[in-house]
Structures are given as structure tokens and as C-alpha cells.
Image: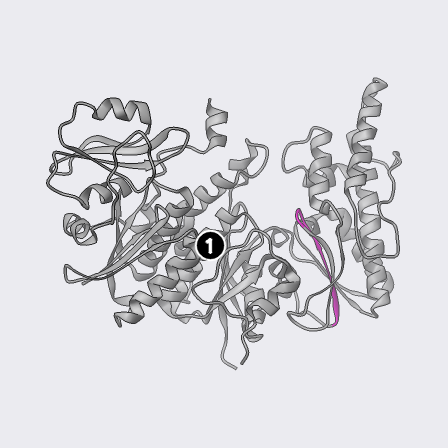
Amino acid sequence: MKDVYILGIESSCDEMSASIVKNGNEEIKTIVLSQMDIHKKYGGVVPEIASRCHIESASMVLEELFCDIDIKLNDITAIAVTYGPGLIGSLLVGLQIAKTLSFVYNKPLIPVHHIAGHIYANSLVKEMKFPLIALVVSGGHTDIIYMKEHFDFNKLGGTLDDAVGECYDKVARVVGLDYPGGPLIDMYAHKGKHVYKLPLPLDDDSYNFSFSGLKSAVINLVHNSAQKGENVNIENLATTFQDTVVEIITKKTMRALKEHNVNNLIVCGGVAANKGLREKFQTLCNEENIDFTVPKMNYCTDNAAMIASAGFYAYQKGIRANMSLNAVAVSSLYEYVRLFKCEE
Amino acid sequence: MITLFIDTSTNILNIALIKDDILIKKTTLESGEHSKYVMVELEKLFVHEKIDPKSVGKIMVTNGPGSFTGIRIGVTIAKTYAWASNINVVPISTLKAYALSYDKHNYYVPVIDARRRYVYASIYDNNYNEVMNDSYISLDDLTEKIKDLSDALIISNDDISDLDTNSCNLDIQRIYDYYKDHEGINPHLLMPNYLKKTEAEEKLGG
């Protein structure tokens, strides 16, 4: 089979990234330009500033990508781009880049759902084996997904309110940590003891999650301590909070594997970088003889390599878009394949 | 040589192809969703005129002021297209493009609504030289600045109640003629000209 080179473009939030991946799993080169330091002083991502930064770097990111490699734009098989979900102004920049390149070089255009991208960050680690359970944990998603083959996404459950990453950031803010606080909570959690009491949220027979109650419990705990004139120990609170989150997530995910008779687990999304969660899954999967995959730390966050990897499998599945492809802020992973699948 | 002209700075989309100094085809479309339609119309234009996208030798693009998102769409396309084709881009002020579309007046005052009684505006003389640079200015200040100018043509496609405006359908041949000897800039250097900081930056700075 002829080698397939996919150029991936990702700009859904505050990272502008471009990557070339060969045959879905061999990363040739990736450029990621993060704006984290710019948004830090505003306490979170400012959409208009993110869009403005994206356009300033748009062509430089491409220049840098193709610099010092043997592959030229014309050698690319197809162009994959994140069309959503994400910040609309940010998405638009990457989308117009991809559409323009597709037009000028007459290459197929492949729309990639951002969450499909996160899932396929794992195919850069090792070949995905089916059937599998994919757990997506990020600032916007907490989904347990069953896949019997490539690009077959079936939702078993998801969060009913806040996403897990969102909950981490809010808890971090309550205890006075700077944005983005999630990784800091993870760091403190490794230093403290589980001394506080927090409820295990939505501990039921479903595969759904609920984190807003847990967030409120943390807020109450901090306020009650303050009223008594006591200071909450951040390290101990972080440990208690993280233990609680990790317990409910691993409990439901492991049950999903068992009940669906699946031996392969992949975890992805920003919270997949959480050391506590990675360690717990690794231990449980070793015990249960489950094949566990998680992306490299730096590919848990947004990057174009995962978009190019997903783009390869989307390309094989006949997923295509034309020049009318638009960016969408809100978009369901479970509608994605049906929307863009072209009949052969 | 083929020149591609792109203007997506306002809700009216203009794209055109110029071949050997002559405008061969122009598409003008009112759209609330440039992100969806610009590349569709661009593709149609090239297919209709049987022109190879790789044969474009220069791109002219309006880079603002105007709608922030609108400007970014045109500038991203122009930047990427020019980078991929290894050609230069000529950035054109949206306001100057308005002015150049008219002639035979002493002064031209192109105006784009910026809301809350503010506008993006500039003043050009009869040779299209800047008397007032592209500015983010209150309507009151603008009115004051132009009240003593004789034969000043106010050009706008927006409803600006205080001003007696003339609508503008871009005259791309005239705009092209004015800029045709401009060698353009490297696409990496092409930036939007918003004329206005973001609210977050204003709050932090203010």
C-alpha cells in the first residue's frame, strides 16, 4: 500500500498546532505553539485574544513544520482539521488554513472531531486493538465510549454536569491556586494525606458522572473551616479530592470493561496527564490483565499529531468535507461520522 | 499574471480575479457566515474561469478595519494561500478600498460602524492621500473633523443615522489599478489591522 501522509491542523483553543503523521501512527514532525503564558494574566483563555494570536502565527507554524524535513506540501495525501468543538474564533483560523491548502494543492479535506483526535492520540503510542473502551477526561468532556472498530463511537455514559477537568480547575480556584490549577492539584495530591471526607459522587449503576456536587462539597469544606478560623491544608484537601475523583472514574470505567467483556482500555484528554489517574488505571489494569494505553504527557493536551492520526483513519473510512466545511463551537462526537461519511 | 482579490472585512463578501491588469470576474455576496462561503465562492470562481489555483501570482486583501472575525477569515486565507504559493500579499485598508471606489470629489470619508456611537473612519483627499489615518473614533469627533471640508463624500454600507452616507460597491478595477505596482509583503508579515484592542486587554491596561 502506498504510504499515506496526513497534514493535521488544530487550533480549537489556545494552541496552534500543525503536524504530519504517516499511516496513522508514525509521527514525522509536530509544531505546537501554546499561548498559555499570554492567557495566564487574564485567569483563563480569552477567546478574542486566542484568535488574534492564532492568525499571527498561522503561516509561521506551517513554515516551521516543513522546514528541515524531506516531505513537501505536494507529498501530503490529505489535510485533516479540527472543525469543532471549541472556541469558534480559534477554530476558524485553523479551518481556513486547511481549506485554503486543500484548495490550492487540490488535496482531500478531512474534518476531525476534536474528541476523536484525543482518542487517536493513543494510536501514536501503539496500534489500537478492538473492541476497546475509551475514556475521555478533559476540561469539556468525561465520556466512557465503546468502540468495536475504528471510527465507531458509542457512548456508554458521560458527565451530567461539570466535566472532570472543569471540576479540577474550579476546586483549584477555591483554594486560591492560579489558572490552570488542575495540574497543581495533582502535584499537591501526591504530597498530602486523605484526611477529609468527601462524598463519592453519583456512585450508581450507570456509566454517568456528576462533579458539580463534589465541587460544592469542597467549597463548603473550605468555607466551614474558614468560619471556624481554621486553614484548610491544601495538600491534604488535594489528596482527598483527587482520591475521590480517581475512585469514581476508575470504578465506572473498570465496570464498563467487565460488563462489555473488553480487554483494551485507552484514556485520553487533558486529565489523562493526571499522574494519580494514570497510576491507578495502570495498577487496576495490571491486576485485571487489561491492555492499557494512555498518550505521552505532552499529547494529552491539544496538538495536531492526534488530529493527523485520527485524520488517517477518517480518510480510510471515507470521511470527507468540501469547501463549505464550517467551524462549530458545539458538536457531538456521536453524530460526527454520520455527518461526514461519503458513500463510496 | 493572475491577481486574486479578497475582501471579507464586512458582511459583504468580495472576491475577484484580475488577469493581466483586467478584472475578469468578481463575486459579491452578502453573507452572515463568511467562514462557510468564502472558499466555496473562491472555488466556483476559479472553476468558472478555468484558472489553476497555483497560477495566482499576487494576492490583494483587505486587512481591516471591520468585523474582527471577518478580517481574520480573509487574512488567514490570503496568508496561507500566499505562503503555499510562495507569493506576496498586498494588504489594503478596508476604508481606503471604499474611497478608491469613488472619484471626482475633494474628500472621501469612508466609515464603518463600530457600535456604541463609535466608527472606524478615515479621510482621504482627491489624490487618495490620508488627511486622517484609519481611526477608531467617536461619531461626534468625526462629525467635528469633517464639518468644514468642502465636497466631502461620506461612504458607508452601514446605517449611521447622523451622517449622509453613500453606499459602496467596491470598484475592484480601480482598487487594483491603484495598487498594481505595489510589490506586496511576505505573507508572514501580513497582520489584521483591528484598530481596537480586545476588551480584556483594555480592562487590564485601563
Task: Give the residue displayed 53% in from the left and 38% down from the top.
Answer: A46
Q: Looking at the picture, how far across and down is residue A41, in whole percent? A: 55, 31
Left-right relation of A332 to A175:
left
Given the image, on which type of amino acid does mark 1 rest? Answer: Gly
Task: Give the residue displayed 50% in from the left and 31% down from the top.
Answer: B200
State whether residue B83 is above or below residue A245.
Answer: below
Give the quadrant of residue A231.
Answer: top right
Left-right relation of B34 to A168:
left
State whether residue A141 is above or below residue A240.
Answer: below
Q: Is residue A194 visible?
A: yes
Q: Residue furthest top?
A: A229
Label 1 residue SS: helix
Q: Which residues are magenta?
A: A131-140
Left-right relation of A89 to B166:
right
Q: Is residue A190 visible?
A: no
* Residue in the foreground of this view, choosing between B164 and B73: B164
Specify the principal SS of the magenta part.
strand
In magenta segment, residue A38: no
* Residue in the foreground of this view, choosing between B99 and A68: B99
- Which subunit holds the residue at mark 1? A
Q: Looking at the picture, how far across and down is residue A246, in whole percent? A: 80, 48
Left-right relation of A248 to B184:
right
**How many numbered dots are placed on residues in this image?**
1
Q: Looking at the picture, how far across and down is residue A24, in whole percent? A: 57, 69
Instruction: Give the class, few, some or many, for how many residues have Cα within 10 Å of label 1's Cα (few <14, many ≥20).
Output: many
State whether residue A306 is above or below residue A262.
Answer: above
* Residue in the foreground of this view, choosing between A14 and A95: A95
Q: How is the image coloured?
A: one colour
Residue under label 1 = A94
Q: Looking at the picture, how far across and down is residue A176, in whole percent? A: 70, 28
Task: Give the residue displayed 41% in from the left and 53% down from the top.
Answer: B34
In magenta segment, residue A138: yes
